[in-house]
Amino acid sequence: MAIIKTMWPLLRGLAFTLKTAFTKPVTYQYPEERREVSDRWRGLHRLKSENGQLKCVACCLCQAVCPANVITVERKETEDGRSFPTRFDIEVTRCIFCGYCQEACPKDAIELTRNYDFCDYRREDFHLSRDRLARMDAGVKKP
């Protein structure tokens, strides 16, 4: 009885290995065929705009809540009292994609998109400025 009790996990592991060894693998022909990502996926950042203007009011809450300190915001006020970011930078190589910036924003101005395939050759290209963040696509890039 003790031998069966100790061998049972080994037999279950071998059975699982044999079962998966003879099944057809799931293969995506990337980049023509993209895998579907979860709705909760947190990819590249994007600044939302409304009526041609950024929704961001440069309150700097996203900068304050960021645990990796990758967000830099500088604000400017207009004569009518409205504020906007003159500088909004994110260093993607240091970001941990936690989503705190998205949750902290009172104007829902920043979001993490579903874009999961971002690559480049130079480190400087992972430094996202305000204008580049505003041009980001909300979904997964299509070829």
Image: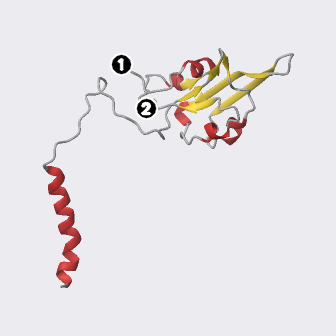
Q: Nearer the viewer, residue 51 or 53?
A: 51
Q: Is mark 1 on a helix, strand or loop?
A: loop
Q: How is the image coloured?
A: secondary structure
Tell whether 122 sits left or right of 25: right
Q: In this image, 41 relative to 78: left or right?
A: left
Residue 4, located in which quarter of the rendered image?
bottom left
C-alpha distance separating marks 1 and 2: 13 Å
Residue 116's quadrant in the figure? top left
x, y percent for residue 23? 16, 47
Disc number placed over residue 143 in the picture, else none: 1
Asked whether, in this view, residue 34 is left or right of residue 77, the answer is left
Q: Which residue lies furthest to the bottom in this view?
A: 1
Which amino acid does the dot numbered 1 rest on?
Pro
Q: In this view, does 43 lie above or below 136?
A: below
Along the viewing direction, whichever of 40 and 20 lies nearer the viewer: 40
For the residues bearing labels 1 and 2, Cβ distance under 8 angstroms: no
Type of amino acid at the residue the image marks with label 2? Tyr
Q: Residue 117's x, y, as percent?
A: 41, 29
List x then y, in percent, for residue 40.
48, 41
Q: Name the spot of residue 140 as percent of width and height, x first.
A: 43, 27
At x 61% / y 24%, what residue is drawn? 48
Q: Within 10 Å of the Cα at label 1, are there few (<14), some (14-19), or many (20+) other Cα atoms? A: few
